[in-house]
């Protein structure tokens, strides 16, 4: 496979040659967001990491060891938006992957835009745009600062992982269409794919990747940081009866393009496409800085299916370490080691599976949210009569039918109290909080600010249901995320490259601090909704 990929990248000319002097600004900024990467994954498998991947980051780079997310819900769309806007959902408006929108009176998806069309396939997967994001990104600010001479490109298997980081003014945001195995985009950016993207798609790498089954990179007996390969709380692929290696991914679906994202090959595929973008778009060779925003989505798909203690997750990170090492070497050779700066972080972490916790005598459980909401709806009808009293449950929030409450002249405080009392009777429910009037006693726990930072009235519910630590909503296999607890909020953040010194920072740092730090490096304005602060240690030469 490696030789095949090297053969592909030789058909284009190099974008830049290495320089012997350090430029006044980085020629290329690369943001790498590893979807669902817990902070501890930087170190958990380090005995098996190579010298050129994660270890190189830590050896040469500046690691912000105590970086946390300071809002809820900790979901993919919110995380990617926060990294690049320096803001929180209360300001940038991306309150979840989906939310109930009062203006549209329905649940909407964060990047869905039916006014746009797909470019690169015949499906509807490209009907997307960043228009629901209410603020600028640091990538937007770079474009504005250079009178749109800087190039900005977003790349991710997930549309939201590409579109939101790239911002409103990007040259392109590319994402994966599993219906055909192609990289596609939206008419928001262009009317036709560039020739190099078409050529990349014609090479049909998904089929080549999936022609090999997913076996462990190293002998499976070496995976000592993981549970046994066959655990009852792990999910399986569609045609499997057990969650064990070897995974015959090429036989799961015909064609098997969809399953690519749920294998480590999805990350390899994304980074090879990123290399193609650097070469063909000549990123880093301009008179002004360029920006490449890359999100690696397969870690999230694999984690959700198998859980963070699985052999599959360990193997995914060993393979990602190898892929990152090759990508860093590529950057050194084709952009120049002193010409680029990159940061690696995550959009959120992940929790241990409840049954894994209970297996080791750690309190945990599963809250049957769908059943409970139905029971709640029945109770409200018994109390107040027929009607759609609840409009939905998204992002751990209940959305009330405010119009019906006003029409029936129902006391809102009483209505909320009845819901709170009902939900608190269930095991696993810690608190039911009124988002319109958060109690002051939460201040000492830093809980009030985190929940308030995630609250945007036009796109949020009114009641926030907080479960006890290690409790899940509904699912029993694989992992999830979204809470204010450390397993979801503690993320890696490592900087490497142009003018970055080696070191560790153990001070309190927030995800929102990334964008203003990049802006300070580039001497440009921070995003217009920024609430973060510059991480001074990153800028000390």
Image (spheres, rainbow, N blue to C red):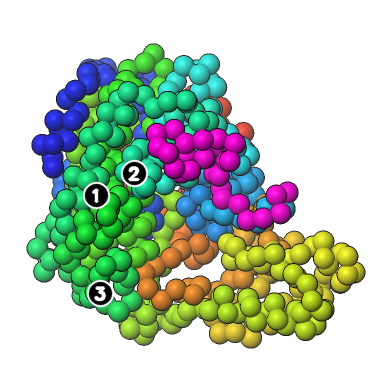
Chain part drawn in magenta: 103-130
Residue 361 picture location, percent across and down:
36, 85
Q: Nearer the viewer, residue 512 or 189?
A: 189
Residue 161 picture location, percent across and down:
44, 44
Could you tell me how far apart the alpha carbons at marks 2 and 1 are, in whole angstroms? 16 Å
Could you tell me how far apart the alpha carbons at marks 1 and 3 are, in whole angstroms? 22 Å
Image quadrant for the C terminus? top left
Residue 503 picture location, percent across and down:
32, 43
Q: Upstream in the sequence, badge 2 or badge 3?
A: 2
Could you tell me how far apart the alpha carbons at marks 2 and 3 are, in whole angstroms? 27 Å
Q: Nearer the viewer, residue 265 or 521?
A: 265
**Crowd rating for badge 3 (residues with CA inside 10 Å; few <14, some 14–19, many 20+):** few
Q: Is residue 114 magenta?
A: yes
Question: Which residue has dot 2 on it?
Answer: 180
Question: Which residue has dot 3 on it?
Answer: 241
* Residue shown at 82% from the left, 79% from the top: 384
Displayed quadrant of residue 430 = bottom right
Image quadrant for the N terminus? top left
Question: Which residue has dot 1 on it?
Answer: 265
* Image vertical order of residue 310 relative to residue 187, above or below: below
* Image vertical order of residue 349 relative to residue 155, above or below: below
Which one is in front in this view, the residue at disc 2 or the one at disc 1? 2
For the question of whether residue 456 can be seen, the reply is yes
């Amino acid at each position: 496979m490696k030789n095949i990929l090297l053969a592909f990248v030789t058909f284009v000319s190099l974008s830049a040659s290495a320089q012997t002097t350090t430029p006044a600004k980085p020629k290329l900024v690369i943001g790498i967001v590893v979807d669902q990467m817990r902070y501890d994954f930087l170190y958990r498998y380090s005995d098996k990491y190579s010298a050129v991947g994660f270890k190189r980051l830590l050896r040469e780079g500046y690691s912000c060891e105590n970086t946390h997310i300071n809002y809820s819900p900790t979901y993919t769309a919110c995380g990617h938006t926060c990294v690049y806007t320096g803001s929180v959902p209360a300001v940038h408006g991306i309150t979840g992957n989906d939310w109930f929108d009062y203006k549209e009176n329905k649940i909407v998806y964060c990047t869905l835009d039916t006014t746009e069309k797909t470019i690169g396939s015949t499906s509807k997967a490209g009907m997307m745009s960043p228009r629901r994001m209410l603020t600028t990104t640091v990538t937007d600010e770079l474009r504005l600062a250079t009178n749109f001479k800087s190039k900005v490109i977003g790349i991710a298997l997930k549309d939201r992982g590409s579109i939101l980081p790239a911002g409103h003014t990007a040259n392109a945001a590319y994402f994966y269409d599993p219906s055909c195995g192609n990289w596609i985009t939206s008419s928001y950016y262009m009317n036709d794919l560039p020739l190099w993207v078409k050529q990349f798609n014609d090479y049909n790498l998904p089929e080549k990747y999936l022609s090999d089954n997913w076996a462990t990179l190293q002998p499976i007996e070496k995976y000592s940081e993981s549970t046994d390969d066959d655990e009852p709380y792990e999910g399986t692929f569609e045609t499997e009866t057990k969650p064990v290696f070897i995974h015959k991914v090429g036989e799961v679906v015909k064609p098997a393009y969809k399953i690519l994202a749920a294998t480590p090959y999805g990350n390899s595929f994304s980074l090879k496409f990123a290399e193609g973008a650097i070469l063909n778009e000549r990123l880093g060779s301009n008179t002004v800085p360029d920006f490449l925003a890359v999100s690696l989505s397969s870690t999230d798909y694999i984690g959700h299916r198998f859980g963070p203690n699985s052999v599959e997750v360990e193997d995914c990170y060993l393979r990602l370490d190898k892929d990152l090492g090759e990508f860093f070497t590529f950057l050194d050779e084709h952009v120049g080691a002193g010409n680029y700066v990159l940061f690696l972080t995550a959009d959120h972490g992940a929790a241990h599976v409840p049954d894994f916790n209970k297996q080791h005598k750690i309190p945990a459980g599963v809250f049957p949210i769908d059943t409970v909401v139905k029971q709640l709806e029945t109770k409200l009808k018994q109390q107040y009569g027929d009607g759609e009293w609840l409009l939905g449950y998204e992002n751990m929030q209940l959305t009330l039918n405010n119009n019906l409450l006003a029409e029936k002249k129902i006391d809102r405080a009483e209505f909320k109290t009845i819901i709170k009392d009902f939900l608190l009777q269930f095991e696993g429910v810690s608190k039911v909080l009124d988002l319109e009037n958060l109690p002051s006693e939460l201040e000492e726990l830093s809980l009030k600010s985190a929940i308030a930072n995630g609250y945007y009235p036009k796109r949020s519910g009114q009641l926030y249901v907080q479960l006890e630590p290690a409790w899940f909503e509904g699912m029993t296999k694989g992992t999830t995320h979204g809470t204010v607890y450390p397993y979801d909020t503690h993320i890696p953040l490592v900087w490497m490259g142009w003018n970055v010194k080696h070191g560790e920072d153990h001070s309190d740092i927030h995800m929102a601090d990334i964008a203003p730090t990049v802006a300070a490096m580039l001497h440009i304005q921070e995003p217009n909704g920024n609430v973060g602060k510059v991480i001074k240690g990153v800028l000390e030469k």
